[in-house]
Image (cartoon, rainbow, N blue to C red):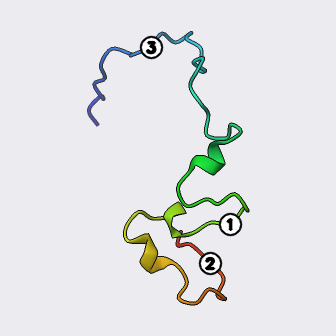
Amino acid sequence: MAPIRVGEPDVRPDATAHVRGVREGNALGSYEMEPGHHLDGTADARRSTGIRPGERNPISPSMPNLPPG
């Protein structure tokens, strides 16, 4: 097997993992800003897919919404 060639590293090995000002995915308020998530805790197909999400929602409002994925 041939050795893998790699380039120069982009950061120093002792650099910090967190950068001040960058929001984390689990920060407060991130859930509400995601498309497909609603304030009451429910979700629709936009949460899982961006390809015609309206066609992947339930046909009847009385049906449970089980987004794909």
Position in image of residue 51 (x %, y %) = 37, 67
* Residue 49 quadrant: bottom left
Front one among 5 and 24? 24
Are discs 1 and 2 less than 8 Å apart at CB?
Answer: yes
Amino acid, disc 2:
Asn
Rendered image: mark on residue 65: 2
Q: Residue at x 39, y 16 (%)?
A: 10
16 relative to 12 in the view: left or right = right
**Along the polypeptide, which appears first: circle 1 or circle 2?**
1
Q: Residues within 10 Å of mark 3 (few under 14, many from 20)?
A: few
Cα distance between the residues tagged 3 and 1 = 40 Å
Cα distance between the residues tagged 2 and 3 = 44 Å
Amino acid, disc 1:
Thr
Q: Which residue is mark 1?
A: 42
Query: Which structural element holds mark 3?
Result: loop
* Residue 29 quadrant: top right
Front one among 59 and 6? 59
Foreground disc of the pair 2, 3: 2
Q: Residues within 10 Å of mark 2 (few under 14, many from 20)?
A: some
How many numbered callouts?
3
* Residue 19 quadrant: top right
**Along the polypeptide, which appears first: circle 3 or circle 1?**
3
Q: Residue at x 62, y 78 (%)?
A: 65
31 relative to 56 in the view: left or right = right
Foreground disc of the pair 3, 1: 1
Position in image of residue 46 (x %, y %) = 50, 64
Q: Which quarter shows the N terminus?
A: top left
Q: Which residue is mark 3?
A: 11
Cα distance between the residues tagged 1 and 2 = 8 Å
Front one among 17 and 57? 57
